[in-house]
Amino acid sequence: MTDDTAARAAGSTGAPPRVGFFTDTSVCIGCKACEVACKEWNAIPEDGLELTGMSYDNTQGLGASTWRHVAFVEQRKPLGGQEPGVGHGNHEDHEDIDVFAAARGLGAPPGSPLAPDGRTELRWLMSSDVCKHCTRAACLDVCPTGSLFRTEFGTVVVQEDVCNGCGYCVPACPYGVIDQRPGDGRAWKCTLCYDRLGVGMEPACAKSCPTDSIQFGPLEELRERAAARVARLHAAGVTDARLYGADPEDGVGGDGAFFLLLDEPEVYGLPPDPVVTTRDLPAMWRHAAAAAVSLTALAAVCFAGRPR
């Protein structure tokens, strides 16, 4: 299924261009404004404020009550193609003070990358994760009530008043995005602010992002913009920059929400090669039907061959 047929296949006629998110993690500052805006606009309940002990993260991952999650990944690794330090103030006033000399031995493991002046290097990778609104969405395939549907914008939305809480969609998602809310049982996830799209407004998370890390617009336009951004980063020496979820030929037909990453997908908690989990369902049904026909024929032969 291609981008221009996703909405039409769902029954929408005269549908607008498919829209989505391009999240450029290279400019994410980890402010979590997107998380707050998402919760406020969609009236999502809080789901715990305990720090995980893994950097500055108190939401851990996406879930029924966390539709946007900003990941903080700390690495003992220099920033590719960027200066390891930025000067502030008058260096002449502090040229006799080496604040890094005392810190150099504070637990840095052997082999930690060092800056030219001997400092241990550290970088933070920050990324705002969200539902991918897959072109081939397995959650849609397995939903027995029609609670999940494809909108005219090509996005995937849950109708909570139709959801029966069966939970089939939870294991079907190759990204582990959709989840059931405890005490409720129904499935919840990002709607890409379907109510805002209907009145010409951009989603709350993109509207609140101060650095334009989260960009919203027509999907084809976003893909072109993302490819140009990767080319600029490569030219600047950031050779690890790559796109994730932007390829319409991948295992889910391309994502409606894709990312520019600065390391391998696994570093961000993303599957390296996601595949729609219902890919083999047609073949499985064909094999099951063939087996049933074979068993029926065998039973008929057995009964026909019995002595009367």
Image (cartoon, rainbow, N blue to C red):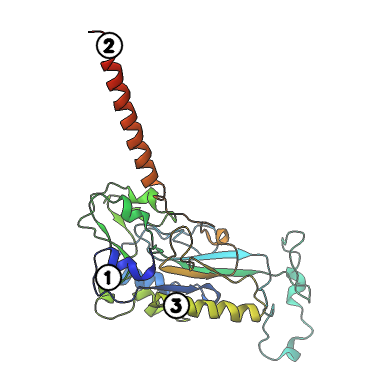
Q: Residue 192 at x, y = what percent? A: 33, 69
Q: Residue 5 at x, y = what percent? A: 33, 68
- Number of other residues with Cα within 10 Å of mark 1, as a class: few under 14, some 14 to 19, many 20 or more: many
User: Which numbered marker is on residue 152?
Assistant: 1
Q: Are marks 1 and 3 in contact (CB under 8 Å)?
A: no
- Number of other residues with Cα within 10 Å of mark 3, as a class: few under 14, some 14 to 19, many 20 or more: many
Sequence-wise first label, 2 or 1: 1
Q: Are marks 2 and 1 in contact (CB under 8 Å)?
A: no
**Secondary structure type for disc 1:** loop
Q: How many marks?
A: 3
Q: Nearer the viewer, residue 221 or 56?
A: 221
Could you tell me which quadrant the N terminus lies in? Answer: bottom left
Q: Is residue 181 visible?
A: no
Q: CA distance from mark 2 to mark 3?
A: 69 Å
Q: Residue 173 at x, y = what percent? A: 40, 53
Q: In front of the other: label 2 or label 1?
A: 2
Amino acid type, label 2: Arg
Q: Mark 3 highlights which residue?
A: 222
Q: CA distance from mark 1 to mark 3?
A: 18 Å
Q: Nearer the viewer, residue 295 or 147?
A: 295
User: Which numbered marker is on residue 306?
Assistant: 2
Q: CA distance from mark 2 to mark 1?
A: 60 Å
Q: Residue 218 at x, y = what percent? A: 38, 77
**Secondary structure type for disc 3:** helix
Q: Nearer the viewer, residue 192 or 281?
A: 281
* Residue name at image x 30 percent, y 17 percent: 302
Could you tell me which quadrant the C terminus lies in? Answer: top left
